[in-house]
Image (tube, grey):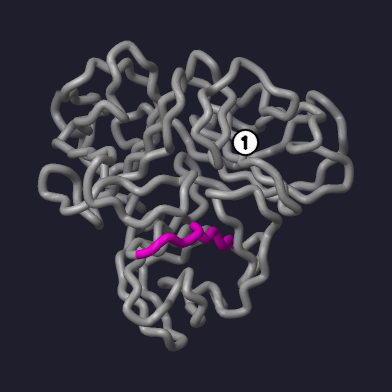
Amino acid sequence: MMMSPQPSGPTIADYFSATTYAGTGAGRNLVTGIDADLHWIKRMDVTANHGLYDKLRGTTKALATNNISAETTLAQGVTAFLTDGATLGTDATVNASGGTYIDWAFKNAPGFFEAVAYTGNGASGRAIAHSLGVAPGLVIIRERGGGPWLTYAPAATNKCGVLSSNVAFTASATSAVTAVSSSTFTVNGGSEINQNGQQYIAYLFAHDTGPDGMVRCGIYTGTSGTQYIDIGWQPQFVMIKGTSLTAHWYISDAARGFFPTASYGALQANSDVAHPTSGAARTDGTPTSFGVTTNVVNTSGAEYFYLAIRKP
């Protein structure tokens, strides 16, 4: 398949960036190149929580995908959202002297990503509006007061997962998204997704199959060894989760390097582990695909879900 050209208007470079940086231990501005609505930061050199900061919840308000704790106020976390990045304080999870970090930054944009905040009302079958313009391929929802990170992946056989855990996906759950469309996502009345009066944040990633699409979600079946998943363009970010087995949520990106040129393996969204040096998923990109090269992301016969973001 020939690689599709990017459109002449705004492109993925306007909406996503992956930036590696070294901590200074002093307040600083981090330049990512975009006016992001979500900064997802992970310290890589030591065990450390993920830190997710978004404009809807405000500066210093951190959530960690690797645990179920309540939202934390980190006065020295992300202290300002800038038009070309973010201001970092001195908290060790974002800016310790000598630490190494990755910041995945996402901007709300039709056909790509949107953060949505809502207050629970306890009603089952509640439709919540979004502005992606296409149906999301992945929905991630978290109660700000604490609880699991619930996911919904329409392409998977069993669609309900947990970002904060390595558990296999299930067909349904007490708290779950039950449907998605180009304008809404529907939730049931479970306490972890729509409890009356509770505050929630949802992160929606589009599934755009068009030739100019910036993000794609899908599934593949493991073969063991190496295989390439054709998506029509070269990715710069790939997140993979085995849906039919116990498996981590593995994240690889071009900023840190894809296998075989990468010095390190994938990070894990559901774990606080440091950047692994071996024994982890490694993903290599080609002009039209990404490759999976280890059994943890390519066990024979297992189903895997992926989220891929296009390279500029």
Q: Amino acid at mark 1?
A: Leu
Q: Name the quarter where the N terminus is drawn.
A: top left
Residue 130 as seen in the image, left or right of residue 225: right
Residue 192 as seen in the image, left or right of residue 282: right
Which residue is rendered at x = 35% and y = 61% of the image?
Answer: 44
Pick the front one: 153 or 91: 91
Pick the front one: 289 or 160: 160
Residue 290 as seen in the image, left or right of residue 260: right
- Taking 142 as reference, is 59 above or below it? below
Which residue is rendered at x = 60% and y = 57% of the image?
Answer: 63
In the rendered image, residue 138, in percent from the top left (x then y), is placed at: 51, 33
Secondary structure category for the residue under label 1: strand
10 Å neighbourhood of mark 1: few (<14), some, or many (≥20)?
Answer: many
Counting every numbered tag in the picture gives 1
Which residue is rendered at x = 16% and y = 43% of the image?
Answer: 259
In the rendered image, residue 250, in percent from the top left (x then y), is placed at: 37, 40
Residue 45 found in image quarter? bottom left
Residue 107 as seen in the image, left or right of residue 161: left
In the rendered image, residue 188, in percent from the top left (x then y), is placed at: 77, 27
Q: Which residues are magenta?
A: 46-54
**Pointer 1 residue:** 150
Pick the front one: 207 or 295: 295
